[in-house]
Image: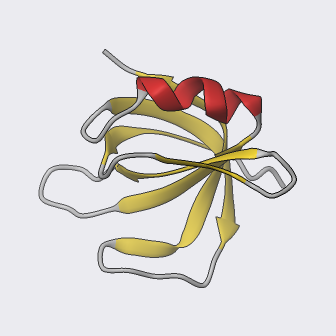
């Protein structure tokens, strides 16, 4: 069974780029991807050199296309679900 998802949406907040103690860049962002009148926000995580390269191109409100896989997580917030998207591709749109 394949675990693959692609979505388009807008960044709900400014992306956070951090570096782990081992030196791996980790980019975290939230994407609003609901239909009009609905509310759905997915947390997105991307690691590695691709995360570091794309981070300067993103800001709150930016339209993005994201592809990756879903992973269960324990954190739930208002408007979010208990999963996060582990991205292998993030592309600015427009």
Determine the image quadrant of residue 64.
top left
Residue 80 location (% of width, % of height):
39, 71
- Position of residue 22 relative to residue 59, above or below, is below
Give x and y (percent) for residue 75.
53, 82
Q: Residue at x 79, y 45 (%)?
A: 24
Q: Is residue 24 left or right of residue 94?
A: right
Q: Residue at x 81, y 58 (%)?
A: 21
Camera-nearest residue between 35 and 45: 45
Counting the numbered discs, the total is 0
Compare residues 16 and 35 and report the one nearer the observer: 16
Quadrant where the C terminus sits is: top left
Which residue is painted at 64% across and 35% down in the image?
Answer: 51
Name the image quarter holding the N terminus.
bottom right
Which scheme is used to colour this image of the protein?
secondary structure
Relative to 28, 19 lies left or right: right
Q: Residue at x 64, y 32 (%)?
A: 52
Seen in the picture, residue 7 relative to 20 is either above or below; the reply is above
**Residue 38 falls in which quadrant of the image?**
bottom left
């Amino acid at each position: 069974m394949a675990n693959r998802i692609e979505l388009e949406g807008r960044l709900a907040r400014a992306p956070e780029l951090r570096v782990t103690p081992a030196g791996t860049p980790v980019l975290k962002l939230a994407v609003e991807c609901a239909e009009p009148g609905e509310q759905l926000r997915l947390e997105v995580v991307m690691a590695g050199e691709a995360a570091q390269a794309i981070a300067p191109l993103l800001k709150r409100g930016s339209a993005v296309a994201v592809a990756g896989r879903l992973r269960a997580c324990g954190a739930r917030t208002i408007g979010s679900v208990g999963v996060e998207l582990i991205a292998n591709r993030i592309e600015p749109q427009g």
